[in-house]
Image: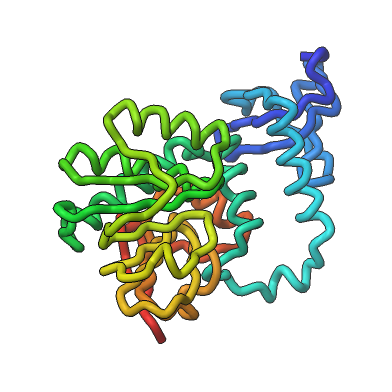
Amino acid sequence: MEEYIGACLIIKTNKTTHIGRLHQISPEMNKMVVEVSGNLKEIELSEIDEVEILADDDSEIIQREQEKEKTKPKEETKKLVPVTHVSTEIYSRIIELSDTLFGPSRGEIVYSGARGVLHLFVNIFKFMDKKFVIYTGSGIFSEIAVVLGRISLLYGTEVTIIPSSKTQRIAKELFYYEANNGMVSNKRRDQPIVIIADTDVKEEMVKGAERVIFLGDYKNIEIPNKEVIFFGVPVRDPLEFTGNSILCDVGLSPKVLSKYNIRKYAPKLLQKIGKQ
């Protein structure tokens, strides 16, 4: 394995898993030396069950996380209390790390989130017979929204999507949505259910709406019936939202959550985050 010196590896032994950069390997001494979180660690070759070589992009993510861990004061780390919500920037890092290393992948998160919201619409809100309009932007919550629109069509629901941006991922999901006779427009008509993802809210978007549902993030607009649905981890403080806050479990790995000191919610498909 001398040709892999300098490569970033995931090394699984019969006791634990190490992630680090290979510094030295000595078959005659039956060991390898790996840099883990800035420290050199010897691993017995006989204890290794599996070795996975990471791509450069994955290595960079791990290096960034390890650098943060090294520069974090130990005393401060001990005092940290698990957070209950994160910023959109941190959420993006969580999704990136989940997608490249721990799982689930970004696509799995999107489809899990869309199915969770559909479950809410079908079994709890029970308004699949009403018309939806979905406003989308360019982030992962918009991807969830477009997939939600497509699978809602299976129930005969009239869905209209109003996209404000088309990334490569959004364009792909919109292609499948339109292939299933989904409607794309640039203006809301009289739809009573308004779904908003990754885009600013204007009065004409929600005027006269029966219910407004935010996906992933929220704005406290003056309308009585409104919900925000978070996916895996709340983005912004749920207790500051003036409507109902709901968490949808998308299967994020506990390893990802622990890296960012995030509180693990109960593993339910959907749960209401109550006001205190």
Q: Is residue 251 visible?
A: no
How many marks can you see?
A: 0
Q: Is residue 117 above or below residue 148?
A: below
Q: Residue at x 56, y 63 (%)?
A: 262
Residue 81 x, y percent position in the rendering: 60, 74
**Quarter of the view holding residue 168:** top right
Residue placed most toward the observer, 3 or 204: 204
Question: Which residue is pictured at 47% across the width and 39% down the height?
Answer: 104
Q: Is residue 103 above or below residue 81?
A: above
Please give the name of the residue rendered at 36% of the width and 70% of the height, measured from the top-left corner: 207
Q: Position of residue 208 (x, y in %)?
A: 31, 70
131 left or right, relative to 106 = left
In depth, the one of 83 and 50 nearer the eye is 83
Position of 255 with respect to 142 (left or right) is: right
Q: Does residue 34 appear in the picture of this structure? A: yes
When asked about the image quadrant of residue 249, the answer is bottom left
Question: Residue 46: x, y in percent?
Answer: 65, 23
Question: Which quarter of the rendered picture does the N terminus lie within?
Answer: top right
Q: Is residue 10 above or below residue 98?
A: above
| Quarter of the picture holding the C terminus | bottom left
Question: Which of 204 and 78 lies nearest the eye of the viewer?
Answer: 204
Q: Residue at coordinates 46% horizontally, 62% vertically from top-left?
A: 264
